């Protein structure tokens, strides 16, 4: 089967997810998007689930802990079902999910729950981490290796792998929206770049170190 990598950029309650394949060794800009979807990772019937830390802010600490644990279990279950469905559909098309890439924020390590709930800024940070964790655990639960890449590191990672071809790669990814159609926003572009970087790593590819490397 042909290898494919799932890429994701996560928001509160949902994620922009896509699947990328191709041969980075043959063509460092040959990104092929096989699937893309808006993946819901909350149960809309659960009050406050889209912003669980905002909701927990108004609860007593023991109740907040219980509420967040319940939300986490539901989100992981939903994400796991969605990832499994995506992987199965790709397998039918003769593609095997070899890894996944999750775009990370540049947030600092989080303190304990009481301190998080006392800070509006930390609440937002914690919610992002909450849903990224749900997606990461869902992938790992399906046996899919997960690589997290901070968004501000994507350009440097691409240049490290593809050298001067990295700029052309980013332009190619940006231009995919013309053939794929909407949505093709920053979410899909960064998720695709992260997935392509992981696919290149899996292939043991370092275009920038190849003596014959050239760009148009």
Image: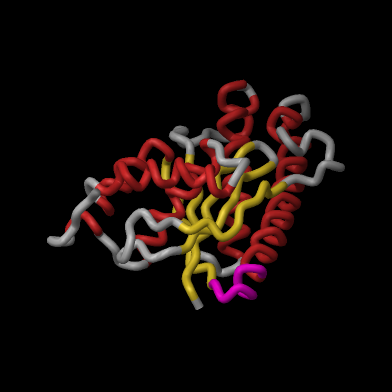
Total numbered badges shown on the rendered structure: 0
Name the residue nearer the viewer: 216 or 12: 216
Q: In the rendered structure, does residue 213 fall within the stretch colored magenta?
A: no
Q: Residue furthest left?
A: 211
Say left or right for 90 vs 164: right
Name the residue nearer the viewer: 80 or 114: 80
Name the residue nearer the viewer: 172 or 64: 172
Q: Residue at x 15, y 61 (%)?
A: 212
Q: Look at the image and tell me whether residue 183 can be seen.
A: yes
- Across and down, in percent, residue 45 comes to 86, 42
Q: Look at the image and tell me whether residue 103 can be seen.
A: no
Q: Residue at x 72, y 57 (%)?
A: 77
Residue 155: quadrant of the picture: top left
Name the residue nearer the viewer: 17 or 145: 17
Q: Residue furthest bottom?
A: 1
* Render colour scheme: secondary structure
Residue 170: quadrant of the picture: top left
Q: Is residue 177 above or below residue 195?
A: above
- Across and down, in percent, residue 208 comes to 21, 54
Q: Residue at x 55, y 37 (%)?
A: 185
- Across and down, in percent, residue 72 comes to 70, 48
Q: Residue at x 40, y 46 (%)?
A: 172
Q: Which residues are magenta?
A: 89-95
- Across and down, in percent, residue 73 comes to 72, 52
Say left or right for 197 vs 82: left
């Amino acid at each position: 089967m042909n290898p494919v990598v799932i890429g994701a950029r996560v928001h509160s309650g949902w994620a922009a997810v896509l699947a990328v394949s191709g041969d980075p060794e043959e063509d460092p800009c040959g990104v092929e998007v096989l699937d893309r979807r808006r993946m819901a990772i909350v149960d809309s019937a659960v009050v406050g689930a889209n912003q669980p830390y905002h909701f927990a802010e108004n609860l007593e600490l023991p109740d907040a802990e219980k509420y967040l644990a319940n939300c986490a279990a539901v989100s992981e279950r939903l994400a796991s079902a969605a990832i499994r469905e995506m992987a199965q559909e790709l397998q039918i098309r003769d593609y095997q999910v070899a890894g996944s890439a999750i775009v990370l924020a540049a947030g600092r390590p989080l303190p304990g729950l009481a301190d998080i709930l006392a800070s509006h800024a930390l609440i937002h940070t914690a919610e992002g981490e909450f849903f990224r964790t749900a997606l990461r655990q869902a992938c790992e639960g399906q046996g899919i290796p997960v690589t997290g890449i901070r968004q501000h590191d994507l350009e440097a990672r691409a240049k490290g792998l593809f050298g001067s071809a990295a700029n052309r790669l980013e332009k190619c990814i940006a231009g995919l929206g013309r053939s794929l159609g909407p949505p093709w926003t920053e979410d899909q572009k960064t998720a695709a770049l992260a997935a392509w970087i992981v696919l290149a790593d899996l292939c043991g590819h370092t275009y920038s170190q190849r003596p014959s490397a050239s760009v148009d």
